[in-house]
Amino acid sequence: MPSVSIITITYNAERFLERTIQSVLAQQATDFEYIVIDGASTDGTRAIIERYEPHIAQWIAEPDRGLYDAMNKGVHRAKGEYVWFMNAGDELYDSQTLPNLLSRIKATKADVYYSDALFVQDDGGRRSGTAIGLRSQVTPHTLPQHISWQDMQMGMKICHQAFVARRAIAPDYLVDNLSADLDWEIRCLKAAQKIEFLPFVLCKYLVGGLSVQQHRRSLIDRFRVLVTHFGWLKTIRNHIQILIRARRFQQQSLAASE
């Protein structure tokens, strides 16, 4: 059984998929499996997967019910002790990222590992995009070095690609909710007995994903998730604080740019 299953979800992402695959293959480690789940892309995605097939433990190309249905397929096929999603366009931070993670897994056997993520923008090519900054610095979401599921009441503290969970505690994703990753992280943190912050960056995250493209619905779905875990009263009160925090962060960013 490999220690880590790295899972890539892709659909019509031929412009970005190769950078993700290459970042996985560049790792100076062997104790992992790589899984690719394609939603029956109609562009050149399949040809890219087939080109790298010798390095991919499992891959499928079939219709699905959306991103989180595909992610469920990845978890169900995984054989690793831990699951880690690195979707098309995202990258492992550098060639030592996985070796560093495996070293911590061997030493501490935590249920969840997490770190910061470097945001990068789409420069329209297969190469890594231009760095924007660490998520904890360019968004209102600060990243505590000690975290519990209760810390998620103001939203998603940890970028999904910077969150590695033991497969035994990983639930299925909500298929019909654009904030299913928030729900998944909360449920993992609830089930975890040991959670460890990693002092190194795990990933490069390509901004502009599904939740950004459908921002209004994403906000509504986030509210639904938070109500499920924290109740109506606390969620309404927290959303007022979220709006105040977002406005204050925007004002600070504008002031810093002047």
Image (tube, grey):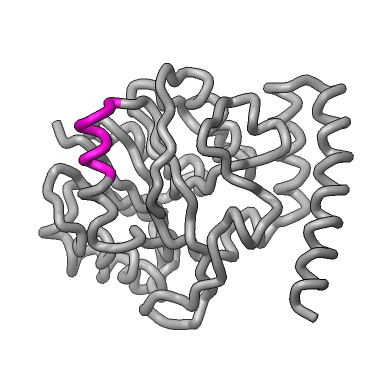
Q: Position of residue 205 (x, y in %)?
A: 48, 60
Residue 229 shown left or right of residue 66 in the figure: right
* Count of picture labels: 0
Q: 184 or 61: which is nearer to us?
A: 184
Q: Quadrant of residue 138?
A: bottom right
Q: Quadrant of residue 155?
A: top right
Residue 1 painted magenta: no
Residue 102 painted magenta: yes
Q: Position of residue 164 (x, y in %)?
A: 38, 38
Q: Quadrant of the N terminus?
A: top left
Residue occupying the point 81% across, 29% down? 235
Residue 80's place in the image compared with 52, above or below, is above
Q: Position of residue 108 (x, y in %)?
A: 28, 27
Q: Position of residue 41 (x, y in %)?
A: 40, 63
Residue 176's place in the image compared with 55, above or below, is above
Residue 251's place in the image compared with 36, above or below, is below
Q: Quadrant of residue 224?
A: top right
Residue occupying the point 85% across, 48% down? 243
Q: Quadrant of the C terminus?
A: bottom right
Q: Which residues make up the magenta segment?
A: 101-109
Residue occupying the point 43% across, 44% down? 70
Determine the main secondary structure of the stretch shown in magenta.
Answer: helix
